[in-house]
Amino acid sequence: MRRSRRDSRPGTRTAGCRTEAPIDEQPQTWHYGLVAKWWAEFNDDFRPHELPYFLRFVEEGQPALDAGCGAGRLLLPFLRAGLDVDGCDVSADMIAACREKAEAEGLRPNLYVQAMHELDLPRRYRTIVVCGAFGVGSDRERDRQALDRLRDHLEPGGTLLLDIEVPYADQQLWKYWLRDERASLPEAARPPAGEPRGASDGTGYTLSTRVVDVDPLDQHVIMEMHAERWRDGVLEAAEDHRLDIGLYFEHEVLLMLERAGFEDVTVHGEHTEREPTADDAFLVFVARR
Ligand SMILES: C[S@@+](CC[C@H](N)C(=O)[O-])C[C@H]1O[C@@H](n2cnc3c(N)ncnc32)[C@H](O)[C@@H]1O
């Protein structure tokens, strides 16, 4: 019998100063608490071509929405360029971090705490960017609903740009598609590699991840992240967060977009405007309403 995803949910663990992440029955993302702080503090770099690629589309189609904007890695450069871009994210902590970073630069974007499958915003957009967020913290039905909601938030003729990392690009995960490798799951918790990374407030952060479950039939992965905050050699806080990831291949995303009513769908390789190849880790789907 097919194993249910719920059977493989990681248990909670406790330690002296550990804060428990809520474990509920919904798919989850790990972008909360200390993990959100880490993203806001350190996650500002880009893959090759990523920023100019998205910038060009947003320049040509405003207003725009950055859906799953996180702490503003893309949204802040869009705003600095004077573009009319709103942001939304399911994580209130990521939105709070994004708002704080924007306000520190005198920027006041419209930011919303909403899951993509329940998107209900006051504006309609010429462009919607979904970068690193499709299939994250979700499940297949919610992802299908998200495409409907994203389409509804586009003006007629508007453009959706949605990227995925193809499942076979991640060596750590791909091996678990094989039954014998999968038998070793869940991975043991690892100690964080290296010294805490210094943050702007004088604290230091560590992160370590582990794969908890991979279901190749359902194309679903559960990962766990352990985060710590240190100050002057003393552990101040520790948290465990879970991430659900839905894995998608090119052709099924094309079918899902078609089913959601998108037209003229083009696929680009690695945030460039060329056709994708089998060696590309990232694909971008460019779809018109
Ligand atoms: C990998 S981060 C990418 C953030 C940002 N787009 C970037 O490129 O830096 C994924 C983001 O998606 C958000 N997210 C996860 N599941 C979501 C959902 N179902 N609806 C909206 N946002 C979601 C997370 O909270 C997180 O901020």
Image (cartoon, rainbow, N blue to C red):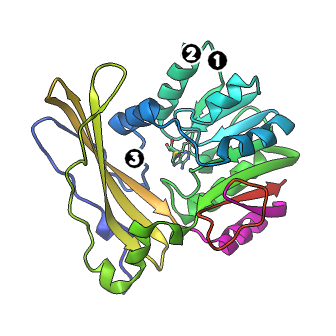
Is 268 placed above or below 77 here?
below
Q: Residues within 10 Å of mark 2 (few under 14, many from 20)?
A: few
- Residue closest to the eye, 31 or 202: 202
Quadrant placement of the N terminus: bottom left
Q: Is residue 136 left or right of residue 250?
A: left
Q: Which mark is residue 108?
A: 1
Tag 2: amino acid = Glu
Query: Disc 3 on helix, strand or loop?
Result: loop
Q: Is residue 2 magenta?
A: no
Tell me where the magenta segment starts and ends, as one range. 248-270
Marks 3 and 1, the one that precedes in the sequence: 3
Q: Are marks 3 and 1 in contact (CB under 8 Å)?
A: no
Residue 273: x and y in percent read 79, 56
Tag 3: amino acid = Trp
Q: Residue at x 27, y 30 (%)?
A: 204
Tag 1: amino acid = Arg
Q: Residues within 10 Å of mark 3 (few under 14, many from 20)?
A: many
Residue 287: x and y in percent read 80, 57
Q: Determine which quarter of the picture holds residue 238.
A: top left
Q: Is mark 1 within 8 Å of ligand 1?
A: no
Q: Are marks 2 and 1 in contact (CB under 8 Å)?
A: yes
Q: Is residue 65 left or right of residue 6?
A: right
Residue designated by label 3: 30
Marks 2 and 1, the one that precedes in the sequence: 2
Q: Which mark is residue 103?
A: 2
Q: Determine which quarter of the picture holds residue 135.
A: bottom right
